[in-house]
Amino acid sequence: MDFLSRMRVLAETVLVTPRLRLEPLMPAHASALFDGLSAPALYAFIPQEPPGNLAWLEARFEWISSRGPADGSAVWLNWALRGDDHYCGLFEATAMADGRVDIAYFVFVGDQRQGLARAAGEAVTAALWADTDTQVIGASLDTRNEASAKLLEALGFARVALIENADFFGGAPSDEYRYERRR
């Protein structure tokens, strides 16, 4: 079984930590995640908008739950983060055939600064590193997102690049840092 095939298996795997249950994202999660994903504050540092309505989010999750593009060039690993009594965010990874994986995450506004992103990040990166063909795990983030930079550094990532004018949103250009961990 090749790397992407193994990543497809991982994409369907529930990950459990002492504080979180990471469930493979499905369209049925849309109603539980809609309110949390609708907070404008989550989008301060990314060129996306909150979901317009529940039907749009269900359709997006349907597309994401295909676990990758039709050409098979990547695998999308997406988990809904569930705490003790409610959903509190998302964790995403995109695996490429050459062993590179990029991650991203959302922790809902009311659940931030409680260590949940770190717990999810530790679980996901451990699962990714368990596959010996994983070569690099990376993340790109807006240079103004200090909390995310601190999280990545706490997870053992190193800043490897500054990409100027990486995006344009909110009426202004955005610079990004690139963070990576290598095998």
Image (tube, helix red, strand yellow):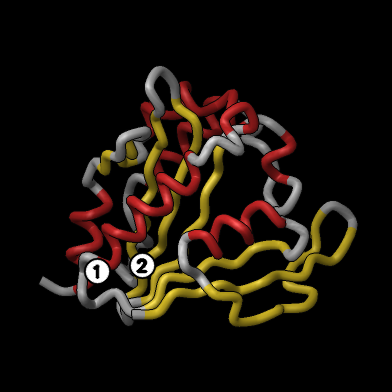
Determine if residue 60 is in view.
Answer: no
Instruction: Answer with the quarter of the image where residue 160 lies.
Output: bottom right
Q: Residue at x 32, y 49 (%)?
A: 66
What x and y, as percent, mark residue 152? 54, 61
In this rendering, is residue 103 above or below 112?
Answer: below
Estimate the spatial distance between the alpha carbons at disc 2 and disc 1, rounded to whole Å: 7 Å
The answer to the question of whether label 2 and label 1 lie on touching residues, with beta carbons closer than 8 A, is yes
Q: Which residue is mark 2?
A: 95
Q: Which mark is residue 75?
A: none
Q: Residue furthest top?
A: 85
Image spot of residue 67 (x, y percent): 32, 53
Residue 153 x, y percent position in the rendering: 55, 64
Task: Name which of mark 2 and mark 1 comes first in the sequence.
Answer: 1
Say whether residue 148 is left or right of residue 69.
right
User: Which quadrant is home to the N terminus?
Assistant: bottom left
User: Looking at this view, is 27 or 176 the one in front?
Assistant: 176
Left-right relation of 171 to 73: right
Residue 26 pos. (x, y %) = 35, 36
- Image: 166 above or below 31: below
Where disc 1 sits, the SS reads helix
Tell me the residue that label 1 is attached to.
4
Between 88 and 68, the residue placed more toward the observer is 88
Seen at 52% across and 49% down, the residue is 105
